[in-house]
Image: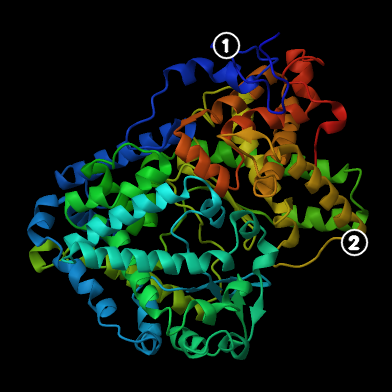
Amino acid sequence: MGNVQFVLGGAPVTKGKQASIKDNLYMHVNYDWLQKAQIPADKPAAGSFQDMDEAVHQKLMNDFDRYHQGKLSAPNPMFAEAMKMHQLALDFKQREQEGVTSLLEVIKPIQKLSLLTDLSHQLTDWVKNGFPLPLTIDVEPDWKNTAQNAVFMYAPELILPDKTYYTKPESDELLHTWATMTSQLLQALGYNQEQAADIVNQALVFDKLLVPHVLPADELADYPKQYNPRTLKEIQQYSQSFDFASTISELIDDHPEKVIVTQPQFFEHFDQIVNDTTFKNLKSWILTKTVNSLAKLLTDDLRQTADQFHQKLSGTQKPVSQRKFAYQIVDETFKYVIGDFYGKKYFGEDAKADATKMIQQMIQIYKHRLEKNDWLGDQTRAKAITKLDHIAIKVGFPEKIKPVYAKMKIIPAEDGGTLLGNYLNVERVKIADNFESYHRPVDRTEWDMPSQLVNACYDPSRNDITFPAAILEKPFYDLHQSHSKNFGGIGCVMGHEISHAFDNNGAHFDEYGNMTNWWTKEDFAHFEKLTREMINEFDGIPFAGGTVNGKLVVSENIADNGGMSCALEALKQSADADLQEFFTNWATIWRMKASPAYEKMLLATDVHAPEMLRGNVQPQNFDDFYQTFDIYQGDGMWLEPDKRVQIW
């Protein structure tokens, strides 16, 4: 036992051999896979999610090929438009001939800016056209009245993934990579080396101005703190240069009573960041963000150059292939059209019925657990059960495609269309539709995820759970897989999404998705105590050269914890329950091999705990785990009973 370190999350493997399941569940189950798994050169990681994702991409890329070969017909006009976009994305020869002409046209309005007033006078048009700006305005359901939409204002994104990155040792190297890449792209557009260097340096100066005033990822993960309603008069006070009130009124063709400001501390400093003195730097920042985001749509050389920063950040070795790039462009622009096609072709009614039945069973189990919960008072318990009863279930794919896609018309190359031009037209259609939605009631039947996405989610503003078709595959789920494996996979994920209704964010939303307090003071204080225990359980665990931020990952850990509680109870109702299969499949679904850079990025920005810790720590909270594998004090997976955390 001398090679075992007793740490939360299981003992690490230190001598190049498979760990005992008693010492490290994740490493025992996944040892062989981890030894053999290769990270594809165009990906930052390999794992269950990545493998499933790749399988989906291959199916769809083959289908797209068959369409162009005349072997597959378009199921609807929107799919035909998507395939026009795909044809343009595949035509690298055409883009070699076009060169940079289309992007030069796009950046002309930026180049023409002489004064800050030039930008402020055009602000509405710039928002409509999707130009990068030092703020974002959009329309979403009002968190306190989710039947209606509201206007939201957001702070801009930084160059690095999170403000915490700017104090890390690798920040200089990352920004140098960004600067080198951006300079190369600018020179391809006709700027000389000195001009490009000046623009890059000015953009970096502006980015540095933003850093002190934006929130880090762990604070952005706290939803209630982002709901800060302001009147038009109040937001007008944020800037002497920009007429925010008029811009918003023009965008939605109305005068809203309130605007939701997600980071008021940023806008309270807006005039310090954006003014006549900083204008030159702002202009360069807008130019570099525009060029960096759109250069991939030009020649293949520029596509590869524009991927350098992403490669450095994520640890990927090369850009995706031309074929996969074309797929990604279509998936990005026609997401729900492709999802409709995928769901109808690849998701069967039997799987939908079985998965829906599992979710309904999990909800009943959850209700039972709430009824016997020993720390909730009757008033809060009744409200929680009401919320549970109102959860809407979405499985497979939406019944209808979002109407906005019918507005998207692609101009083919023979009619003068370019990939960049069509891409921007699609973005403009989406932006216009978003602002028009201010006058429409919220459509609760809309999905947050398309069917081809390997993921699942809970939407607090709609109080619904979504399980796209693509996640209902092995190892998460299979009609012919044992109940025990299914509950250790998709069953835990189902319980996880239900638990989000009662995590530290979901707890602030009622059965209709409205942000309101439905707790008694005493019950919420107890819930906050349990939440702190969950924060502390993960906080400070060493990983990827850093440590886990328990506050950042707490909502997902509450959901993992509740999901496992629920799935375990559901499985134990089956006569053929096999808890070894349950826990080993749980560890299997979280297997991942990633580049060090990608692990560091996830550690700083991802609201989910690292996969290895998800695989190991949650089982340590449950007595069933210890009984199933005969784990005792002295074993690497042992956690003292008073340290085990269970909330739901």
Q: Earlier in the sequence, mark 1 or mark 2?
A: 1
Residue farthest to the front?
A: 194
Residue 643: horizontal and vertical position, in percent? 83, 32
> Residue under circle 1?
15
Residue 328: horizontal and vertical position, in percent? 31, 49
Label 1 vs label 2: CA separation? Answer: 51 Å
The type of residue carrying mark 1 is Lys
* Circle on res. 582: none
Q: Is 91 placed left or right of 255 in the picture?
A: left
> Residue under circle 2?
521
Mark 2 and mark 1 in contact (Cβ < 8 Å)? no
Q: How many marks?
A: 2
Q: Residue at x 36, y 52 (%)?
A: 176
| Circle 2 SS class | helix
Residue 391 is drawn in which quadrant?
bottom right
Most foreground residue, 409 or 636: 636
Q: Residue at x 66, y 78 (%)?
A: 229
Most foreground residue, 89 or 344: 89
Q: Residues within 10 Å of mark 2 (few under 14, many from 20)?
A: few
Q: Residue at x 80, y 38 (%)?
A: 646
Q: Quadrant of the C terminus?
A: top right
The type of residue carrying mark 2 is Lys
Q: Is 257 placed left or right of 22 in the picture?
A: left
Residue 496: horizontal and vertical position, in percent? 66, 42
Up/down of 350 relative to 82, above or below: above
Q: Is 587 placed left or right of 83 in the picture?
A: right
| Circle 1 SS class | loop
Most foreground residue, 460 or 21: 21
Q: Is residue 349 visible?
A: no
Q: Quadrant of the N terminus?
A: top right
